[in-house]
């Protein structure tokens, strides 16, 4: 019999495959929970003054693991006796469960492909998306629900409703991303029902949000977000250096034993990404709050309640108006808008137009590409001869209109309207990303004045959009115009070729 060449994936995993998927989710949850538990127990064992038994330490470990998924914790042993919420998620702590979920999803797909190859079958496609993501998530959530029940009591316990709302969302998102990457990052990963829903979108909206435009806008928005985050990290580093003595004093004031200092250091490290986002919000101008009715921004810092002694909080500027040292941070959102516009223009006109400057009248073997690039630019600035097209006997100088009109006109070139619209969409992507990231870092650290702590997600996104759109669109149009002015290289068959040296026959 002829073996079947049907590459259609099965409608549902087989029972053994379901068991492996559930086991993979359980293992991913157990590894994350176990890593946090080991760290907490190690700090508890080495503490010279343990105030509770191992059961309380295990409850704290489970609560911290749920906090990494976005759940809100509640402190019961406060000075006033009233329960105080803890709603700020340490982003570095969240990286551990997200990475484990991502690896579990990839491992399930890769193991399935290896089994098919060992059995001598042709690749039949990855496991179906819906059942695979569902069974993996089910195994992970099985451990998660158990942790919610276990961590519902104790001096630091998890809010059950918050945990049950955040845990499934984080799990499904991480598993779905791992499945998508393991499947080769398909450009059309949606199932048939979701695609039918998207087809009901009005034609005008679909015309604006084309696939090519959305991909380019997403990458441009990622470039702008990277600039903002890099600037935020630089601001945090400079502020900690400026307030180094205060940060050191707060570090020593919290605890004296080395185990306590190690715990404070670990807590500060897992909160560094949060501080970077707060620094980015500060540079944008939206700032962040340190209590109800307060605002910390480059134009001034309002009076705020007494903050806990913590090294990262020592970097907060003192109350008072801004100074010439804080005003230049407004250049950071402008740089983000330039990054969005630059990436949009780079995608609008292919890179071949920029590489055209490296072409010169001599063959590439005679003159290195880097030297040829600088020489062509220098000749262009002087108005002399540039890239010569035709049969090699002569041509229009690079400064003439004929040479300027010889640009790459492939399908990568967009019109002015398309370029401006893509830049605007890239600015929207940057603003949405900043809103989502800052939304994770805001929360409560107590009741009363500390129930509003961190940057406002909607205000940060709105201010980021207001900064980047007026800069990104003009930058993209100007760079597109400049890149199109660069001369197009002559075809390979029409470029002058160096005379070949005759080779003597081998005797």
Image: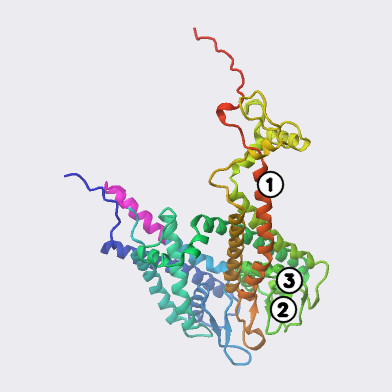
Camera-side residue: 383 or 178? 383
Name the side, left or right, on which 25 lies relative to 42.
Answer: left
> Which residue is painted at 63% across and 90% down in the image?
79
Res. 444 in view: yes
Camera-side residue: 287 or 305? 287
Tell me the SS state at disc 3: helix
Q: Position of residue 284 (x, y in %)?
A: 70, 68
> Which residue is painted at 57% across and 43% down in the image?
409
Do the residues bearing badges 1 and 2 touch, measured as CB atoms within 8 Å? no
Tell me the SS state at disc 1: helix
The N terminus, quarter of image: top left
Camera-side residue: 435 or 15? 435
Going from N to C along the chain, the mark reached first, 2 or 3, is 2
Going from N to C along the chain, the mark reached first, 3 or 1, is 3
Per the rendered image, the range of residues in magenta is: 105-124
Res. 222 in view: no
Q: Is residue 112 magenta?
A: yes
Label drawn at residue 315 = 3
Q: Which of the 4 image quarters holds residue 495? A: top right
Residue located beneath label 1 in the image: 482
Q: Which of the 4 image quarters holds residue 385? A: top right
> Which residue is painted at 33% across and 53% down in the image?
125
Q: CA distance from mark 2 to mark 3?
A: 15 Å
Majority secondary structure in the magenta region: helix
Residue located beneath label 2 in the image: 295
């Amino acid at each position: 019999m002829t073996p079947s060449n049907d590459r259609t994936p099965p409608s549902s995993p087989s029972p053994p495959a379901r068991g492996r998927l559930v086991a993979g989710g359980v293992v991913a949850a157990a590894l994350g929970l176990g890593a946090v538990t080991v760290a907490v127990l190690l700090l508890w064992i080495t503490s010279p003054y343990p105030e509770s038994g191992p059961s309380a330490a295990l409850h704290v470990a489970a609560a911290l693991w749920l906090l990494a998924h976005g759940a809100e914790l509640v402190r019961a042993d406060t000075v006033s006796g009233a329960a105080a919420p803890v709603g700020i998620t340490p982003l570095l702590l969240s990286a551990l469960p997200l990475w484990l979920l991502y690896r579990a999803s990839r491992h399930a797909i890769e193991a399935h492909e290896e089994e098919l190859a060992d059995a001598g079958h042709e690749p039949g496609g990855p496991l179906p998306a819906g059942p695979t993501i569902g069974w993996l998530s089910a195994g992970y959530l099985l451990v998660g629900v158990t942790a919610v029940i276990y961590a519902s009591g104790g001096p630091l316990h998890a809010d059950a409703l918050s945990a049950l709302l955040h845990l499934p969302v984080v799990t499904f998102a991480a598993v779905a991303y791992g499945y998508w990457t393991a499947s080769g990052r398909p450009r059309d990963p949606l199932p048939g029902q979701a695609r039918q829903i998207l087809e009901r979108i009005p034609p005008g909206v679909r015309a604006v949000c084309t696939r090519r435009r959305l991909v380019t806008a997403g990458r441009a928005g990622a470039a702008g977000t990277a600039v903002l985050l890099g600037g935020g990290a630089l601001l945090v580093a400079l502020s900690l250096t400026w307030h180094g003595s205060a940060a050191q004093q707060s570090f020593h004031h919290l605890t004296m034993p080395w185990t306590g200092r190690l715990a404070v250091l670990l807590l500060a490290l897992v909160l560094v990404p949060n501080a970077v986002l707060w620094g980015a919000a500060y540079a944008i101008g939206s700032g962040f709050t340190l209590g109800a009715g307060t605002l910390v921004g480059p134009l001034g810092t309002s009076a705020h309640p007494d903050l806990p002694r913590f090294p990262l909080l020592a970097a907060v500027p003192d109350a008072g108006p801004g100074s010439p040292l804080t005003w230049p941070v407004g250049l950071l959102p402008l740089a983000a808008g330039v990054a969005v516009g630059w990436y949009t223009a780079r995608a609008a006109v292919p890179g071949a137009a920029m590489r055209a400057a490296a072409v010169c009248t001599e063959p590439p073997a005679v003159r290195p590409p880097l030297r040829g690039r600088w020489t062509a630019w220098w000749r262009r600035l002087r108005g002399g001869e540039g890239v010569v097209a035709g049969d090699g006997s002569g041509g229009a100088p690079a400064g003439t209109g004929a040479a300027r009109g010889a640009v790459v006109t492939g399908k990568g070139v967009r019109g002015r309207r398309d370029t401006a619209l893509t830049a605007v969409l890239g600015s929207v992507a940057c603003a949405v990303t900043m809103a989502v990231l800052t939304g994770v870092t805001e929360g409560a650290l107590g009741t009363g004045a500390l129930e509003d702590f961190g940057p406002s997600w909607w205000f940060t996104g709105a201010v980021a959009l207001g900064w980047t759109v007026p800069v990104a669109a003009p930058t993209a149009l100007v760079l597109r115009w400049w890149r199109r002015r660069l001369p197009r290289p002559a075809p390979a068959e029409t470029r002058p070729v160096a005379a070949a040296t005759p080779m003597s026959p081998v005797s």
